[in-house]
Image (cartoon, rainbow, N blue to C red):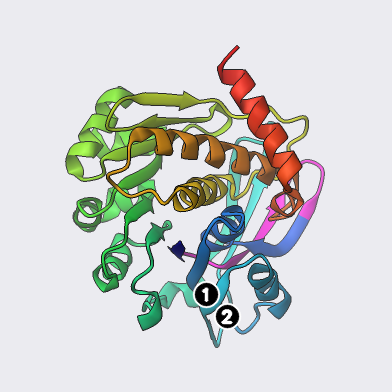
Amino acid sequence: MSILVVGSVAYDTVETPREKRERQLGGSASFFAIATLGRGDVRCLGVVGDDFRQEDLDLLAGRGADISGIERKPGKSFHWSGRYHDDMIERDTLATELGVFADFQPEVPAAWKDSEYLFLANIHPALQSHVMDEMNGPRLVALDTMNLWIETTPADLAKILALVDVLLVNDSEARQLTGKRSLAHAAKAIQAMGPSRVIVKKGEHGAVYFGRDGVLSVPAIILDDVIDPTGAGDCFAGGFVGSLSEAGATRDSDDAVFRQAMLDGTVTASFCPEGFNVEGLLQIDDAAYAARLATLRGMMVP
């Protein structure tokens, strides 16, 4: 199955209480593509500057991603810088330098318009709608957004929400989007906007899935050591959509396949904080994945 991801391919500078790493591979599309773990033919649509290292593009390609949709333009690549607090949960954004990403206008290659799964990462809702308009009826569309777009572009966001099948948001974004304090009421309000399935990400407390036939709360896997949690949400999305692709799911599939995808997304994301940038993801093998999935199931069922 083919998966198209539209989002940022970027550099992150991350400072933690123990170490600082400068200009390491980051961006929503990068984390997502690697986190699919080869469960689909992943196609990356994005833009980088002429400062972007070829070795980082080669890494994405080496993990099975088609990078022919990543355009290289004169200028600086998108760069984010942040500092984590001692709890490795709270963080301060020190700099957001959009570079060539500021003028990103995604154009889907003709051969990619029939992609079966579409993940619209956290970019301007108008750009998300533009991509959606260029597609030839994907089997399933998932979308991520953030408080900035909820606050500043509500009409554009409402337009694209009416067209997608799965929305991924954190709990504060769900409340901001709907004005509902209860997550159950917020999820129901979001479903009325278009997405039939809503995933509320709760960080170190896991994620909650609101489906057509019920609710599933999945805890986060407890890690011995957290090194760098940057990108964990995009890794969850990659594991989730990759699982759906492997199962051949459609928007009309039973909730059971989405519940399994919740487990796969959680397991995949749990590897991310165990290294800087994508280092944790690169350590995943079949045995490690199976062991961690068993751990997660054991946390949920005695």
Q: Which residue is mark 2?
A: 49
Foreground residue among 122 and 197: 197
Indicate whether 292 appears above or below 269: above
Q: Which residue is mark 1?
A: 99
Tell me the quarter of the picture where residue 17 sits. top right
Residue at position x 74%, y 40% in the image: 288
Foreground residue among 152 and 187: 187
Outermost residue on the front side: it is 248
Q: Are marks 2 and 1 in contact (CB under 8 Å)?
A: yes
Left or right of residue 155: residue 246: right
Mark nearer the viewer, 2 or 1: 2
Residue at position x 72%, y 50% in the image: 15
Residue at position x 19%, y 43% in the image: 193
Residue at position x 32%, y 57% in the image: 139
Image quadrant holding the C terminus, namely top right
Residue 237, can we see it? yes
Tell me the quarter of the picture where residue 278 sits. bottom right
Foreground residue among 43 and 106: 43
Left or right of residue 21: residue 64: left
Disc 2 from disc 1: Cα separation: 7 Å
Picture disc at residue 117: none
* Residue 182, magenta (yes or no): no
Q: Which amino acid type is marked by label 2?
A: Gly
Q: Earlier in the sequence, mark 2 or mark 1?
A: 2
Residue 109, can we see it? no
- The percent position of residue 80, horizontal first and vertical second, equals 59, 60
Image quadrant holding the N terminus, namely bottom left
Left or right of residue 263: residue 152: left
Q: What residue range appears in magenta?
A: 7-20
